[in-house]
């Protein structure tokens, strides 16, 4: 990809990623007057962890007492790494934008008091709506256009290049501002909608010198039927659980901490939805989470009366909170013109060290998308000329055809398997301990030279080679950070250090890819809550 | 994983090729989608949701191939079943969002106590 690209566009803002964060970023950028292009690896409407299933939102009415309570709870559960002005701001922005979603036509259900219930959305309809909103805002959408690398000059980022998966051709979008909204990294674990997110954006940002923050907060799994991808734990709240001999190990209702991991570490675990014990209850459970039942109906298993095996699927930094370090109120990074939103960004400012899964991350996607879009638009529109005049160069350094340092092809499948073997097992990544993590990191380090190899010409080959490099990089960041944080905080645990250590009330930043350096950053205290972004526009789509 | 493209039903609109988030399909010379990279299927069911003629079938198993026949799937009313639940293509008659029972899920959860029964009775009278 050193020659000119077949498809060339110039915009003010390029958004990379078409999940909710990318959609909100593109809408926001366009609504602030920027010519905006959104390029997604898949399709805006189906890409990302939100689209296939349902998701809860952090949605708190503008009631001072309720919001103060929510903030106090999160500061504590988030291991004191979040910032109250950011949490207030998150709640306000998500609240306002969810009113827009309603006006745009999302059909919220009624609660028991006859009021619209707006703290949960069904992904297919939500993201189908967001696609229409983004189009109506005038954004150029490039589906099946994975980005492979950023473009850069001495003024910062200037666009990106990638491949069109449908034609095999290459594309280049010049833009004075770029928003990375490519999601977290779950290493192709097949958690629902998670396989698009292979940490590509984190690698691209890191190649420009941006730091990662909170990568140790990546110890996150979700429980599914063993054959299924549908990671919606709330259905399992209606289950009783059994061991391999059929002995009851849990009757249903609230479970002890680490219940699934502890029992799965000992042997198979089976579930049955024994608490869905009337047709009426079954209908309610089904209609809340319809996709969860689809694989069962197809397999001919009635989960209310038949038991089924369960397993845990790794969710990495999709439900974890680590990612690209943000440096400004509008999701700026340390590189001029480069912004990050959604799960690609560190969510420590709002969620802290505890999973932002469901509510916090879903609202963060809305809010950080909106903020980054405004920031990117204002940055781009303040430049004297557009990015087509800049002498930008491709910044990718790993897993690309033009960066190969040997003629041996990257063994993509072997590398992915090797990374998964270190990241998925509960005994390594869930029950974290120093010697085990250190051994895993050493083996991951040995994968790194392999992703500097040659890359085949096919679109799939180019994308998957780059994904392999991104996954090795993200895995190494996660375990490097986990070994440095010698304590237990939020979702991060270490067997040797089971307590929270006050001297580590700080964020852990990593830089570099081949050689990873670290430093600590104190959590800003005080500060004003930045007012929400409001957009004046037609409200119908 | 995706297991079936019904040639009989397919209208070669190309939508599944375009919407698959993990690029599992290629279109052949006649425009018919081919399952080119089944191992990349993430079993998210989105292709089925978008197929306007219910020509696709994603089986329940995420990691293993499942043998299916079109006739059996038709007999079991499986083709198009997920799209029908969402309500895509129903012109608004069906909406998974509008019929979302999340707001009352808590009332039937174990541990909700006596409140559950009373709450549900109230719901059914609304």
Image: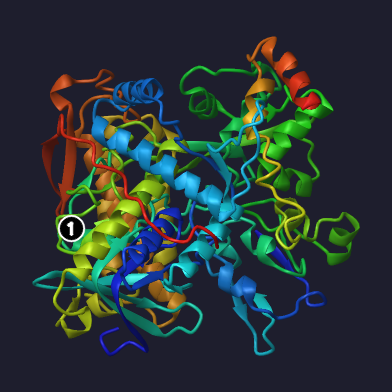
What secondary structure is found at the residue carrying circle 1? loop
Is residue A270 at least partly visible in the picture? no
Q: In the picture provided, is A529 more to the left or to the right than B18?
A: left
Name the residue that disc number 1 marks. A514
Crowdedness of circle 1 by 10 Å Cα count: few (<14), some, many (20+)? few
Q: How many marks?
A: 1
Front in this rendered view, residue A449 or A85: A85
Front in this rendered view, residue B19 or A350: A350
Report the residue at 64% width, 57% height from top.
B45
Image coordinates for residue B33, horizontal then vertical, percent: 66, 77
Q: In the picture provided, is A478 more to the left or to the right than A210?
A: right
> Residue A35 falls in which quadrant of the image?
bottom left
**Is residue A224 shown above or below A25?**
above
Image coordinates for residue A424, horizontal then vertical, percent: 44, 43
Report the residue at 66% width, 30% height from top.
A114
Report the residue at 18% width, 51% height from top.
A211
Q: How is the image coloured?
A: rainbow
Q: Which residue is most to the left?
A: A154
Q: Which chain does tag 1 point to?
A: A
> Residue A292 falls in which quadrant of the image?
top right
């Amino acid at each position: 990809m050193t020659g000119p690209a077949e498809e060339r566009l110039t915009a003010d803002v390029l958004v990379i990623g078409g999940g909710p964060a990318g959609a909100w970023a593109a809408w926001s950028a366009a609504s602030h007057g920027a010519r905006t292009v959104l390029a997604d690896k898949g399709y805006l409407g189906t890409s990302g962890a939100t689209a296939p299933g349902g998701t809860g939102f952090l949605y708190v009415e503008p009631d001072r007492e309720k919001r103060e309570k929510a903030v106090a709870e999160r500061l504590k559960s988030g291991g004191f790494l979040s910032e109250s002005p950011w949490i207030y701001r998150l709640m306000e922005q998500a609240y306002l934008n969810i009113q827009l979603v309603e006006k745009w036509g999302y059909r919220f259900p009624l609660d028991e008091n006859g009021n619209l219930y707006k703290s949960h959305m069904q992904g297919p309809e939500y993201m189908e709506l967001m696609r229409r909103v983004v189009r109506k805002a005038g954004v150029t959408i490039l589906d099946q256009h994975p980005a492979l690398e950023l473009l850069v000059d001495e003024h910062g980022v200037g666009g990106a290049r990638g491949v069109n998966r449908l034609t095999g051709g290459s594309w280049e979008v010049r833009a004075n501002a770029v928003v990375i909204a490519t999601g977290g990294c779950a290493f192709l674990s097949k958690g629902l909608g998670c396989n698009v997110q292979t940490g590509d954006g984190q690698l691209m940002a890191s190649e420009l010198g941006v730091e990662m923050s909170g990568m140790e907060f990546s110890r996150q799994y979700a429980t599914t039927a063993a054959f299924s991808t549908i990671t919606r734990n709330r259905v399992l709240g209606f289950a009783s659980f059994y061991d391999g001999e059929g002995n009851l190990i849990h009757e249903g209702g609230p479970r002890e901490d680490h219940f699934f991991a502890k029992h799965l570490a000992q042997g198979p675990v089976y579930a049955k939805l024994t608490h869905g014990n009337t047709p009426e209850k079954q209908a309610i459970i089904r209609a809340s989470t319809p996709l969860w039942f689809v694989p069962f109906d197809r397999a001919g298993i009635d989960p209310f009366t038949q038991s089924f095996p369960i397993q845990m699927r790794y969710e990495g930094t999709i439900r974890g909170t680590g990612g690209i370090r943000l440096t400004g109120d509008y999701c700026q990074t340390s590189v001029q013109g480069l912004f990050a939103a959604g799960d690609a960004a560190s969510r420590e400012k709002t969620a802290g060290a505890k999973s932002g899964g469901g509510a916090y991350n879903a609202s963060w996607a809305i809010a950080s998308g909106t903020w980054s879009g405004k920031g990117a638009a204002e940055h781009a529109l303040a430049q004297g000329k557009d990015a087509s005049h800049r002498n930008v160069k491709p910044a990718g350094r790993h897993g690309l055809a033009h960066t190969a340092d040997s003629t041996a092809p990257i063994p993509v499948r072997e590398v992915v398997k090797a990374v998964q073997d270190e990241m998925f097992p509960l005994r390594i990544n869930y029950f974290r301990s120093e010697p085990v993590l250190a051994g895993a990191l050493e083996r991951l380090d040995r994968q790194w030279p392999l992703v500097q190899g040659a890359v085949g010409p096919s679109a799939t080959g180019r994308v998957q080679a780059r994904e392999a490099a991104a996954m090795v990089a993200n895995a190494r960041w996660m375990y490097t950070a986990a070994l440095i944080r010698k304590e237990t905080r939020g979702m991060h645990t270490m067997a040797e250090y089971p307590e929270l250590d006050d001297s580590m009330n700080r964020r852990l930043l990593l830089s570099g890819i081949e050689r990873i350096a670290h430093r600590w950053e104190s959590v800003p205290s005080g500060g004003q809550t930045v007012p929400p972004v409001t957009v004046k526009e037609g409200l119908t789509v | 994983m995706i297991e079936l493209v019904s040639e009989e039903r397919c209208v070669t609109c190309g939508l599944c090729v375009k919407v698959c988030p993990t690029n599992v399909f290629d279109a052949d010379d006649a425009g018919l989608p081919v399952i080119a990279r089944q191992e990349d299927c993430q079993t998210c069911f989105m292709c089925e949701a978008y197929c306007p003629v219910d020509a696709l079938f994603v089986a329940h198993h995420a990691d293993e191939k499942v043998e299916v026949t079109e006739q059996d799937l038709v007999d079991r009313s499986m083709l198009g079943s997920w799209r029908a639940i969402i309500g895509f293509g129903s012109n608004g008659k069906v909406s998974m969002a509008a019929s979302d029972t999340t707001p009352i899920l808590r009332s039937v959860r174990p541990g909700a106590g006596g409140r559950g029964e009373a709450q549900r009775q109230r719901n059914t009278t609304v």
